[in-house]
Amino acid sequence: MTFSITARCPETGMFGVAVTSSSMAVTARCAFARAGVGAVASQNITDPRLGPRGLDLMAGGKTAAEALDVMLGEHAHRDYRQLVLVDGAGGVAHHSGRHTLGTHGVAAGEAAVAAGNLLAGPRVPAAMIEAFQESAGAPFPRRLLGALEGGLGAGGEAGPVRSAGLLVAHREAWPLVDLRVDWSEEDPIAALTAIWQDWAPQMDDYVTRALGPTAAPSYGVPGDE
């Protein structure tokens, strides 16, 4: 009941996951990224413990493929999980257990993997990778959102999606982008894109507020003139 893209930006070194689902608050359970390390999507009857585990293994020097092998070897319920990893060099790895739900699939591109389950058709992950690759040169977070739009345009899930999120890590210990639409009866991907458009001009300012508050801009809110 989920489709996602997990990727690394070769120009900036950013890692990110964009994900959407018919389930509520999908990003809280499925998307994981760590600056300088990699990104993981854990979906299909999700075990959120697998995201931090994959990141810890890659932080310890494992490639995405090596980390996945370790995770599958130690996880008793591997047949119920769909996992995607991207490492610090842009290497990718993925797993779809034999109990992955409904029509499902994975498509890989350069430093990017799209995966989904309970899809309307098998071409959805490939359409996501195509949309991501065709947007080269655009800001990395926007490219991830474009991949979700591409997947939706190819049919998306078998039913309507209700939540969506965008997680991007870059340089610092906290996410550069962590935007979510946890429930929408209409179009959570469009709503998420609108939030991104508002966030993008302010994104770097919040890093400045953390690292160099004397240089931080005022937003003109009452009491902060």
Image (cartoon, rainbow, N blue to C red):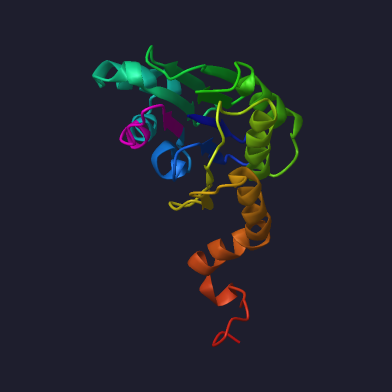
- Residue in the image at 57% along x and 86% along y: 222
Image quadrant of residue 161?
Answer: top right
Image quadrant of residue 76?
Answer: top left
Q: Residue furthest top?
A: 98
Give the x, y percent position of residue 64: 44, 23
Residue nearest the viewer, comparing 177 with 101 = 101
- Residue in the image at 45% along x and 38% along y: 23
Q: Is residue 180 above or below residue 100?
A: below
Give the x, y percent position of residue 79: 33, 15
Query: What segment carries the magenta color?
Result: 40-53
Is residue 52 on the magenta stretch? yes
Residue nearest the viewer, comparing 52 with 82 = 82
Is residue 109 on the magenta stretch? no
Give left or right: position of 43 versus 221: left
Q: Is residue 183 above or below residue 86?
A: below
Give the x, y percent position of residue 120: 59, 22
